[in-house]
């Protein structure tokens, strides 16, 4: 169960910590006090997004921490499959929201939002204010049925999904082969043209890179030649201004005076070495320049070849290797086209085979769903009678879709009658918002028992109800609270009176700021809050007595009826 909640810097919440208890935890407060913000903080742990403006003004981050005590083996097993090890039977989920991103941790270890959502989904279930509206959608109705029978239904659904993908792929292949003779002739001509265009180019691996180098060299050939000729003039022996001529003359002059001073011998040797290196450089340079003849025809042929290769790249692939691969694929298509009749028969047979397999697993799925639909129907009727639907009839209608889907071929619709003598009709044509809320409450209770989810959270499940119906809903909440931890935000005194633990959410001024706080209520404080919920412009002694009596009746009900 959820034992501790810590929320910081979220909207009106500055910093609150709450210790929840087992059974029915009721949260009440004035409209606008921040009850939905508190619920929203828990939804963050389930992966919901948060707008930037939800971070408290002046704060750099918002944070939510939920500490769970895991008390049933099924939840522990589910967490184990997700790789979560319990620490003294506890799981701590933390989400810190910063500017446009979040940091998520499970027991102090960083994780993804998806991993946190998967873990949280094993531990709690949240019913939001408008979630009951989803019951009007047939996809949601089917989802609920499948969740009820998930241990048997989900494995078969996975088989249906795989069979559908196989069928879809085989059908796609058959459609791609479905061509008349004229289309096949056009396709053959097109393939032959592409293959011929590629093969006639005689492309060699790496040829494009070598041609690019040669092209750059030829393209800059004139400039290179002019520059090297200038260098040869500056360093050669053919010019009176050339370095070679100057160094050679310097060597001769230095050698003439070396005999007069032995210290000049080393300098003479160094200069002779420079002269030798310069002569070697000039010979190599002359050889390069002599070979560097700008050949206009070679340049034209190189450019033409590169244009051809680049054109093929644009059409068939970004490299010569990719072009060859494309050509091989087209050859295979041409071979397949030559064996068209054989391939078409094989593809058609594969479609029939995969469709037959899909039919088998879809039939199996439908049979299992119908089995669980009767079980779910009985449970829903039982739950609805507890919620003051005294003469209710409920039925799950099955129709077969025209086409297969990855979810089988079942098209279901929940049908209900809430009055004696009336036949069942689709949910959306019969029920009001308040009735829809009660139906969803019954379903949530059923699924929670099935999944052994320990913590259920309801946000204003009391929408659109009052009087005797409100009392029945409160009794149902108390029943659920015997097997689960329940957190319920409510405006109804009948439900609040059933609280095992009662919290008041209120907002007040702190300097220039408005903050939301939450306080546990006991004894007279709880009675006083019940009196406020009972309403009236003035809280008279009669209202307080009424609230006290309501609290006492709820206590008696829990001690006698729920034992």
Image: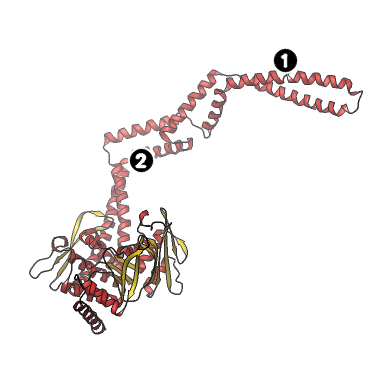
Asked where in the image residue 529 lies, by quadrant, the reply is bottom left
- Mark 2 — residue? 336
Q: CA distance from mark 1 to mark 2?
A: 73 Å
Q: Are marks 1 and 2 in contact (CB under 8 Å)?
A: no
| Residue 229, x across and y down, in percent | 65, 19
The answer to whether residue 341 is above or below residue 30 is: above
Q: Residue furthest front?
A: 511
- Whether residue 231 can be seen here: yes
Disc marking residue 449: none
The answer to whether residue 349 is above or below residue 308 is: below
- Towards the viewer: 223 or 374: 223
The answer to whether residue 433 is above or below residue 207 is: below
Crowdedness near tag 2: few (<14), some (14–19) or many (≥20) residues, C-alpha within 10 Å: some
- Mark 1 — residue? 239
Asked where in the image residue 180 lies, by quadrant, the reply is top left
- In terms of secondary structure, where does tag 2 sit? helix
Left or right: 285, with 338 as reference point: right
Of the numbered discs 1 and 2, the one sitting upstream in the chain is 1
Q: Residue furthest left?
A: 421
């Amino acid at each position: 169960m959820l034992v501790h909640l810590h929320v910081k810097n979220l909207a009106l919440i500055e910093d609150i910590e709450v210790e929840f208890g087992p059974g029915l935890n009721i949260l009440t407060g004035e409209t606008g006090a921040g009850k939905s913000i508190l619920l929203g903080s828990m939804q963050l742990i389930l992966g919901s997004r948060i707008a930037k403006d939800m971070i408290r003004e002046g704060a750099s981050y918002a944070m939510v921490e939920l500490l769970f005590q895991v008390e049933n083996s099924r939840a522990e097993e589910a967490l184990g499959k997700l790789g979560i090890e319990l620490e003294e039977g506890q799981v701590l989920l933390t989400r810190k929201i910063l500017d446009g991103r979040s940091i998520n941790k499970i027991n102090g270890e960083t994780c993804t939002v998806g991993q946190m959502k998967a873990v949280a989904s094993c531990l709690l279930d949240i019913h939001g204010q408008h979630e009951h509206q989803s019951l009007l959608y047939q996809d949601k109705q089917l989802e609920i049925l499948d969740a009820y029978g998930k241990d048997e239904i989900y494995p078969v659904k996975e088989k249906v999904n795989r069979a559908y993908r196989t069928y879809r792929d085989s059908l796609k292949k058959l459609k791609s082969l479905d061509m008349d003779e004229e289309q096949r002739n056009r396709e053959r001509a097109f393939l032959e043209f592409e293959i011929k265009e590629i093969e006639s180019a005689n492309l060699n691996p790496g040829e494009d890179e070598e041609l690019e180098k040669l092209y750059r060299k030829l393209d800059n050939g004139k400039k290179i030649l002019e520059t090297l000729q200038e260098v040869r003039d500056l360093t050669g022996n053919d010019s009176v201004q050339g370095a070679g001529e100057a160094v050679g003359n310097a060597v001769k002059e230095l050698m003439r005076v070396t005999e007069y001073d032995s210290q000049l011998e080393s300098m003479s040797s160094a200069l002779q070495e420079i002269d030798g290196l310069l002569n070697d450089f000039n010979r190599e340079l002359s050889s390069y320049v002599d070979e560097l003849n700008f050949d206009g025809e070679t340049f034209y042929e190189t450019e033409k070849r590169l244009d051809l290769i680049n054109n093929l790249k644009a059409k068939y692939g970004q490299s010569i290797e990719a072009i060859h691969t494309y050509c091989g694929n087209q050859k295979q298509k041409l071979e397949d086209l030559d064996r068209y009749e054989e391939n078409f028969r094989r593809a058609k047979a594969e479609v029939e085979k995969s469709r037959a397999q899909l039919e088998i697993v879809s039939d199996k799925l439908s049979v299992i769903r119908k089995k669980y639909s009767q079980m779910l129907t009985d449970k829903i009727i039982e739950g609805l009678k507890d919620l003051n639907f005294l003469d209710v009839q409920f039925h799950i209608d099955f129709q077969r879709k025209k086409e297969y889907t990855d979810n089988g071929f079942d098209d279901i619709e929940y049908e209900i009658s809430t009055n004696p003598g009336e036949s069942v009709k689709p949910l959306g044509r019969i029920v009001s918002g308040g009735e829809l809320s009660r139906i969803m409450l019954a379903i949530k209770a059923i699924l929670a028992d099935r999944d052994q989810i320990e913590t259920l959270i309801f946000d204003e499940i009391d929408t659109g109800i009052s009087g005797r119906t409100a009392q029945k809903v409160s009794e149902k909440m108390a029943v659920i609270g015997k097997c689960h931890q329940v957190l319920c935000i409510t405006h109804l005194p009948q439900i609040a009176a059933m609280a095992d633990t009662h919290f008041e959410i209120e907002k007040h001024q702190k300097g220039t700021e408005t903050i939301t706080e939450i306080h546990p209520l006991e004894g007279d404080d709880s009675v006083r809050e019940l009196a406020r919920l009972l309403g009236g412009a003035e809280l008279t002694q009669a209202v307080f007595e009424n609230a006290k009596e309501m609290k006492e009746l709820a206590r008696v009900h829990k001690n006698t009826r729920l034992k």
